[in-house]
Image: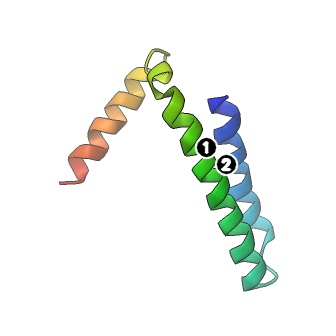
C-alpha cells in the first residue's frame, strides 16, 4: 500500500511538471490536485510508519529522520 501510494504521488507530480506547460491555470490545477494526492499519501504513510520501521528500509528511514531533525535547529 505504501509503495503504491507513494508511486502514484510521484507520478502525478512528474506528470504535472512535464505535461502542464500550456497555461498557468492548467499547471496550478494539476499541481493542487497533486498536493491533494500527496496529502493522501501522507495519511497512508502515517498509518503504516511503524511497519516501515520493521523492514529493510527501517534503518535508513530512522537515520534520515534523525538527520532532518538535526538540520531543523
Q: Residue at x 72, y 44 (%)?
A: 8
**Residue 57 location (% of width, % of height):** 48, 23
Q: Which residue is mark 2?
A: 9
Judge whether residue 4 can be spotted in this image: yes
Q: Which residue is mark 1?
A: 41
Q: Is residue 34 above or below residue 60?
A: below
Q: Quadrant of residue 6?
A: top right
Instruction: Name the side, left or right, on which 53 lies relative to 40.
Output: left
Camera-nearest residue between 43 and 70: 43
**Residue 27 location (% of width, % of height):** 73, 75
Q: Quadrant of residue 2?
A: top right
Q: Residue at x 47, y 28 (%)?
A: 49
Instruction: Specify few, some or many for label 1: CA neighbours under 10 Å numbering under 14, 14-19, or 20 or more.
Output: many
Q: Is residue 28 above or below residue 35?
A: below
- Dots 2 and 1: beta carbons under 8 Å? yes
Task: Using the numbered discs, state the Cα–Cα distance from disc 2 to disc 1 in whole angstroms.
Answer: 7 Å
Q: Residue at x 61, y 43 (%)?
A: 41
Mark sitting on residue 3: none
Camera-nearest residue between 36 and 8: 36
**Residue 43 location (% of width, % of height):** 56, 41
Camera-nearest residue between 49 and 21: 49
Instruction: Name the side, left or right, on which 33 lies relative to 63.
Output: right
Q: Secondary structure at mark 2?
A: helix
The quarter of the rendered structure image containing the C terminus is bottom left
Instruction: Name the side, left or right, on which 51 lies relative to 20.
Output: left
Q: Is residue 38 above or below residue 63?
A: below
Q: Secondary structure at mark 1?
A: helix
Amino acid at each position: 500500500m505504501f509503495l503504491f501510494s507513494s508511486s502514484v504521488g510521484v507520478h502525478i507530480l512528474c506528470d504535472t511538471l512535464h505535461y502542464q506547460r500550456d497555461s498557468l491555470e492548467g499547471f496550478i490545477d494539476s499541481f493542487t490536485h497533486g498536493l491533494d494526492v500527496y496529502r493522501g499519501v501522507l495519511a497512508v504513510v502515517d498509518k503504516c510508519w511503524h511497519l516501515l520501521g520493521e523492514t529493510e528500509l527501517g534503518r535508513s528511514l530512522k537515520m534520515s529522520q534523525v538527520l532532518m531533525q538535526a538540520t531543523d535547529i
